[in-house]
Image: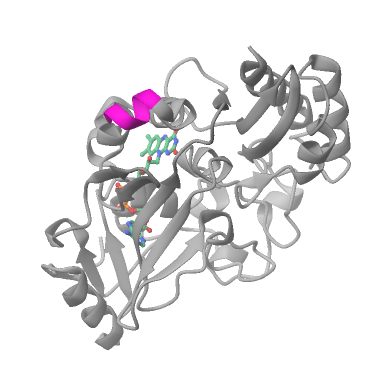
Amino acid sequence: MREFKIAQPRSAEELAALLAETKEMTALMAGGTDLIDELKSGVAAPDLVVDLQTVAGLAGIGRDKEGLRIGAMTKVVELAGDAAVLQDYPSLKEAALSLATPQLRNVGTVGGNLCQRPRCWYYRDPQVVCRKKGGFNCYAFQGRNKYHGIFGGGSCFIVHPSDLAPALISLGAKVTVGSAKGDKVIPLEQFYILPDIDVLRENVLEKGQFLKSVWVPAPKPGQKAAYVKLKERGTWDFALVSAAVAGVVKDGIFAEIAVVMGGVAPVPWRLKKAEDVLRGKPANEAAVRLAADEALKDASPLRENGYKADLVFAALKEAVLTLAA
Ligand SMILES: Cc1cc2nc3c(=O)[nH]c(=O)nc-3n(C[C@H](O)[C@H](O)[C@H](O)COP(=O)(O)OP(=O)(O)OC[C@H]3O[C@@H](n4cnc5c(N)ncnc54)[C@H](O)[C@@H]3O)c2cc1C
């Protein structure tokens, strides 16, 4: 493992000042469950690792009548067991409990989960210099691509790995980005960027910036939400395809609906076309079939991952019909 220095700022202000001043190649470390793997394999080789565990005020969940604020350093296990989450945010609870293993949920944080790097085997192989690491080729495009994206690829076919992100986006979450210039609040949906904007990173964070907290609005009257994760194995696994759905069904008709898929694109993938089809329709399987067919017109499966189109329908059906139940 390459040597690096470690910094342990004590407050968000100290962290912001350090990130603004340092000229060294820097990596932020939350729980370290993803970053340390990258350091060991050499896929990440920073000069300076900034430990977020010493930063006061970044962890914890607070609730008021407007919604729920989740500090970036809140552990996934705390999110999954929070009383407000258990009572009012069933899809978030489901996503948190579906994620990794109990050991990883005990250590991994909400911010680390949202900012984790992709699992593409070409990206994770230290011998391979793919586009995501500054090379010229996406080896998945013509290589082994069973687990890769069917939407939004283009220059790189990674899939977004986080279970929390689709659930949070479907609930209308916003994130606070901290830096020495002050805090900035943006919708979580706009936090992620496609490879065609910048193939080297997966989100809008620039040098000097860090994720501070996530805010989830209070559920609307009558709102229901569901998260469905389809995996290859019965034990811990990343999603082949996941569907997060939130909305309001009135008299059996979808009045409002948000649909966000995981495991299908480089970013959590909003199925706006499916939402448009479902809105105003009865909550039944025929409507979901129409919605999935419309959304899948934008899909471009690779040689080995055409099966994901069927999983999009299956995940969407289970999630959407939960709302109608
Ligand atoms: C075996 C295994 C199975 C897994 N299965 C799943 C799964 O099914 N679903 C799923 O969603 N995840 C899964 N994961 C990923 C796991 O959830 C993440 O490793 C974890 O959530 C990352 O949290 P962390 O706090 O340890 O982050 P770290 O490893 O510390 O950081 C991860 C990345 O985020 C960046 N980062 C961390 N915090 C911040 C911040 N506040 N601001 C800016 N950047 C930040 C780091 O620089 C790093 O690049 C799995 C991981 C493993 C090892």
Above-or-below relation of 159 to 115: above
**Magenta region, main secondary structure:** helix
Q: Residue furthest top?
A: 325
In the image, residue 109 sits, relative to residue 49, either above or below, namely above
Residue range corresponding to the magenta coloring? 82-87
Location of residue 209 in the rendering, given as x and y in whole percent from the top left corner: 37, 73
Residue drawn at x 75%, y 47% is: 151
Q: In screen coordinates, is 266 left or right of 50? A: right
* Residue 279 appears in the figure: yes
Between 198 and 20, the residue placed more toward the observer is 20
**Which quadrant of the figure contains the N terminus?**
bottom left
Answer with left or right where residue 137 lies relative to residue 274.
Answer: left
Percent coordinates x, y for residue 293 in the rendering: 87, 31
Q: Mark yes or no: residue 125 visible.
A: no
Quarter in which the C terminus is drawn = top right
Q: Nearer the viewer, residue 295 or 272?
A: 272
Q: Residue at x 35, y 24 (%)?
A: 86
Residue at position x 71%, y 47% in the image: 143
Mark count: 0
Q: Position of residue 130 (x, y in %)?
A: 60, 62
Q: Which residue is nearer to you in this view: 26 or 194?
A: 194
Instruction: Say if 49 sits above or below 231 in the image.
Output: below
Relative to the observer, which residue lies in front, 276 or 139? Answer: 276
Q: Position of residue 205 (x, y in %)?
A: 45, 69
Is residue 156 rendered to the left or right of residue 284?
left
Residue at 63% x, 21% y is 323
User: In the rendered structure, does residue 177 fall within the stretch colored magenta?
Assistant: no
Magenta highlight on residue 84: yes
